[in-house]
């Protein structure tokens, strides 16, 4: 259950990534946590794990949206 604690810690820490490399590392960290939790969820089918994965997914999507930036207008 160390992965659960790590996921909860990642979720609660302040989401401020000043550089692009920090954002990339945070997105990769979120993805690895989600995939790890998914393996646990496949065995246990615990709804709390699914809720944590959903919250991490929204955090990851926000980070990736920030990485992509605004589209350029022609």
Image: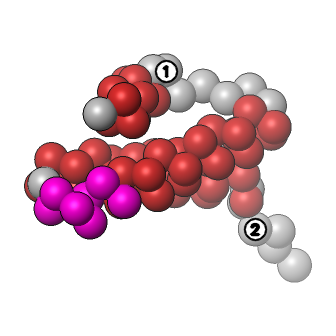
Q: Characterize the local packing of mark 1: few (<14), some (14-19) or many (20 or more) Cα atoms within 10 angstroms.
A: few
Question: For mark 2, what is the residue?
Answer: 71
Q: Nearer the viewer, residue 35 or 53?
A: 35
The scheme the figure's colours follow is secondary structure
Tell me which corner region of the image, top left, top right, bottom left or bottom right, holds residue 17. top right
Q: Nearer the viewer, residue 70 or 46?
A: 46
Residue 59 is labelled as none
Question: For mark 1, what is the residue?
Answer: 14
**Span colored in magenta:** 39-45
Q: Please, is residue 61 above or below residue 28 in the view?
A: below
| Residue at x 82% of width, y 68% of height | 72
Q: CA distance from mark 1 to mark 2?
A: 27 Å
In x, y percent, where is residue 21?
81, 37
In x, y percent, where is residue 4?
32, 35
Q: Earlier in the sequence, mark 1 or mark 2?
A: 1
Tell me which corner region of the image, top left, top right, bottom left or bottom right, holds residue 46. bottom left
Q: Say whether residue 41 is magenta.
A: yes
SS class, disc 2: loop
In x, y percent, where is residue 41?
25, 59
| Residue at x 60% of width, y 25% of height | 16
Q: Say whether residue 21 is magenta.
A: no
Q: Quadrant of the C terminus?
A: bottom right
Q: Quadrant of the N terminus?
A: top left
Q: Please, is residue 4 above or below residue 71 in the view?
A: above
Q: Left or right: where does residue 60 sit relative to residue 40?
A: right
| Residue lying at the far right of the rendered structure | 74
Q: Nearer the viewer, residue 59 or 72?
A: 59
Judged by its main secondary structure, the magenta piece is helix
SS class, disc 1: loop
Judge whether residue 4 can be spotted in this image: yes
Q: Left or right: where does residue 34 sit relative to residue 66?
A: left
């Amino acid at each position: 259950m160390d992965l659960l604690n790590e996921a909860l810690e990642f979720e609660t820490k302040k989401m401020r990534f000043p550089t692009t490399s920090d954002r990339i590392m945070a997105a990769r960290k979120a993805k690895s946590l989600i995939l790890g939790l998914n393996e646990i969820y496949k065995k246990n089918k615990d709804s709390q794990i699914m809720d944590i994965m959903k919250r991490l997914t929204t955090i990851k999507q926000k980070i990736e949206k920030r990485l992509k930036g605004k589209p350029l207008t022609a």
